[in-house]
Image (tube, helix red, strand yellow):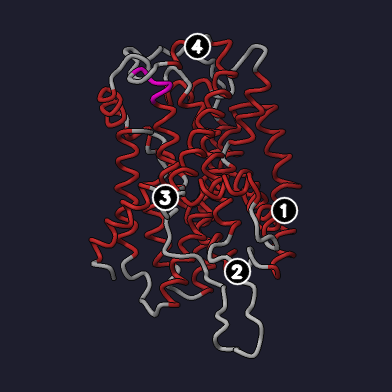
Amino acid sequence: MVEESTDRRAETAGSHPATAPPVPRPSRLIALDVLRGIAILGTLGTNIWILTNPEGMIGYLYDLGRSTGEWMWTERVLQQVAQGKFLGLLTIMFGIGLAIQQRSASTAGRNWPGTYPWRAGLLFLDGLLNFLFIAEFDVLMGYAVTGLVVAFILATSEPVQRRWLIGAAGVHIAMMTLIALAIAVEPQQSQATRTPLQPNPYAEGSFWDLVVFRLTNAGLFRVEPVFVFAMSIALFLLGARLLRAGIFEPGGTRLRIRLMIIGLGIAAPIDLLAGIAVGGDLILFTRYGSAPFVALGILSAVAEWYVRRQQAGFIGRRLSEIGRTALSCYILQNLLASVLCYGWGFGLAARVAPDDRVPFTIGMYLLVSVLIAVSAHLWLRRYPRGPVEWLWQAGYLALTKGR
């Protein structure tokens, strides 16, 4: 989410005084910031169901795909639309950001990865604090470790990077295959009734009770970053490769069209039908299998839309502002929803009747989305970067003494 700079493609007119100066081009790629904004709001589309569950992530994991009543199909559709796609998009965007940092270092004549490990360390610290005090489903720690590994891989040759990408993807596919086989041979067991959380730190506990609960259950809550480590390496490297292949350039039209066909024309219908028809039983295979392909389709569609446009438009500007303050907005959206839903705040999640859970969750998503969009807009009117980004950069400069 944080990078030194995007490619600066504006040309100076001083070297050609006899010709008219070229039209200046933006120093930031509009599509990059818009995509980050989409990814942030999209991850909220998944996480909001965790935050509005009276038993938090524990209740969400148990209830996934088991909804009933008049809102059942609405919930299935909404959950499946967001499930995994924007996590995949965010992961790819991290890889693109890492490649941009490498390109910036190369342009400035600096060694790579150079001081990047300090950046990764600070991101890990951000994630650790986010995990302990705000959200047990934090992704930043996993991205920090993945980014550190990929930073060194990017310092190797193209063939080596390609082998790493194929190898990491192969490991992930092998893991998914083994899980599928285990499920196929495992005898079906009747579902036992789950014992409710007693005490329930989400609805009844204090802020500190939730911190202790996250620490106590850190093994459970940190399983996903370990499980998707190979996939994350592959998506980071794929993002870097797509940047070099010109995914955001006018000449990348054929690449974008191919990825849109694969992601939106093929993977998206399969993903939606499987997730909606079967429910939570196929979440592993949609979230970590088909969803990353859908993410590539979203990436390509947005890149195609903005590749020849100099203006973002009203919605694009709001998404771009969220994207420019992505780290701050990611943390803020979870914090705001926690204040509204958890017992140490307003405790709204525990007060909502089960039959009203879906409209309540939709309302919470819309409210939090508007709040972070307004916050990003107002903040950027006065400051060039988000508050967490500013602290992160200040810490990085202090640690590296401005190198």
Distance of label 2 from label 4 (alpha carbons) = 50 Å
Q: Secondary structure at mark 2?
A: loop
Q: Which mark is residue 146?
A: none
Check whether the beta carbons of the residues at disc 3 and disc 2 lie within 8 A of each other: no
Q: Which mark is residue 382?
A: 3
* Of the two numbered discs 4 and 3 in the rendering, the one whose residue sits closer to the viewer: 3
* Earlier-in-chain disc, 1 versus 4: 1
- Residue at point 62% right, 48% down? 316
* Earlier-in-chain disc, 3 versus 2: 2
* Earlier-in-chain disc, 4 versus 3: 4
Residue hosting label 2: 25
Disc 2 residue type (three-letter): Arg
Residue hosting label 1: 260
Residue hosting label 4: 352
Q: Secondary structure at mark 3?
A: loop
Check whether the beta carbons of the residues at disc 1 and disc 4 lie within 8 A of each other: no
Distance of label 3 from label 2 (alpha carbons) = 23 Å
Disc 1 residue type (three-letter): Met
Check whether the beta carbons of the residues at disc 3 and disc 1 lie within 8 A of each other: no
Q: Residue 57: percent from the left, percent from the top?
A: 43, 26
Q: Read off the magenta span.
A: 339-343
Dominant SS of magenta comes to: helix
Check whether the beta carbons of the residues at disc 2 and disc 4 lie within 8 A of each other: no
- Residue at point 56% right, 43% down? 86
Distance of label 4 from label 3 (alpha carbons) = 38 Å
Distance of label 3 from label 1 (alpha carbons) = 37 Å
Q: Secondary structure at mark 4?
A: loop
Q: Crowding at label 4, few (<14), some or many (≥20) Cα neighbours within 10 Å? A: some
Q: Visible in this render: residue 29?
A: yes
